[in-house]
Image (cartoon, rainbow, N blue to C red):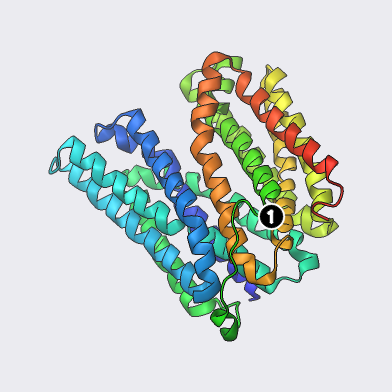
Amino acid sequence: MRPLSLLFLTLFNSILGLSILFPILGPLARELGLSELQVGLFSTGYALMQFLLSPYWGRKSETAGRKPILLVGILGFSVSFFLFALFAWLGYQKALSEPTLFTLLLLSRLLGGAFSSATLPTAQAYLADITPRENRAQNFAVLGAAFGLGIIFGPAIGAGLAQFGLLTPVVFSAGLALLNAAFVGWVLPESRRSEAHLEATPGLSWRDPRVLPLLAAGLSINLASVAMEQTVAFLFQDRLGLSPAQTAQAVGLALVVFGVVGVLVQGVWVRMVRWSPRALILLGLPLSLLGYLGLVFAHNFAGLTAALVLLGLGTMASPGLSAAQSLAVSDREQGAIAGLSSAAQALGRMLGPTLGTGLYGLSPAYPYVFSALLISLAMLFFLSQPRLAR
């Protein structure tokens, strides 16, 4: 298999293992006597560690090599999930007080965020290593497709395994990560030449004018998406007058459609048309804008789902932006820019849930108006900078 195919499998397995936890984390926490706020802190803490440490791992992969850092990230993720399952089992056995249980579970999630923050930036830097600069957008779309497929299949697998006990998906994810580490260790070749590891890593910061506007655009796009994801189930229930069970079915179907469209756009269409990063961005952003406006005004299932389809089509902007970030710096700075990009995405995952749900409490339309404004600002910025992301 080509390195690109091997990297696709590596990232798919990593995202699959994480998303398996999505449908069971809430019910598991309630069985253990934890509150909704405490569950929210698990996700916030996970994203916080990714925000803080992604730049470090990206830079580290420049000197230590991509493959060792990938292995560290995947193995650390596995250990954190095994610890989460162990502490939760002790909670079931009433061997821990509630404050102690929450503290240990939170620490395991912080550990998972700290180590998993190595995976995505290193994978992006690996891809840049093995891809000619003119093909970056097409190959970055492969990583987007791997991410999308993991998000589609992971929750379904988690829900299926949950019938054997809510801890079964957690242990399965930890075991899957071990298998993924074995796959990387035995099969995935190192992408950087040995002499490249000896070169000093150049400094690259958020303030670098080459990357600051691109990182800000990435934050805006991700923040808009997370605000939508955190509130769309409420929107379906309130707009359509559904019961909780009906809401789960309707939202699940609509999000599967959204995910499949995104995977097809990134995994097939972007690679087929071979457009420049700028062209992908300037088509993807208007489609996303239409999608968010559709959520503002739609009041039936077909309209809401059509809006999500537009958002799925708009995901073509993501590989375009990732490629633009990669092309903005030298080959010796690919790990550093990938780390900063992952940190920007993590910041969006930290802020998005609070902003989205807070705005929804004011009005159901407000989160999507907010997202539309963010996308509009990103569009205006790229339109005003004709040389950017060429």
152 relative to 69 in the view: left or right: right
Give the vertical position of 306 relative to 129 (above or below).
above
Q: How many marks?
A: 1
Q: Residue at x 70, y 53 (%)?
A: 209
Crowding near pointer 1: few (<14 within 10 Å), some, many (20+)?
many
Image quarter hosting the C terminus: bottom right
Q: Is residue 152 visible?
A: no
Estimate the x, y position of residue 35 in percent, counting from the top left.
Answer: 31, 29
Residue 102 falls in which quadrant of the image?
Answer: top left
Residue 121 place in picture, x, y as percent: 56, 60
Depth order, front residue of 241/314: 314
Relative to 252, say whether 55 is above or below: below
Q: Amino acid at mark 1?
A: Ser
Q: Residue furthest bottom?
A: 195
Q: Residue at x 47, y 74 (%)?
A: 68
Across and down, in percent, residue 217 comes to 68, 43
Taking the image as shown, residue 176 lies to the left or right of residue 362, namely left
Name the residue that disc number 1 marks.
322
Q: Secondary structure at mark 1?
A: helix
At x 57% / y 31%, what residue is drawn? 227
In this picture, is 116 found above or below 316? below
In terms of depth relative to the viewer, which is nearer, 157 or 387?
387
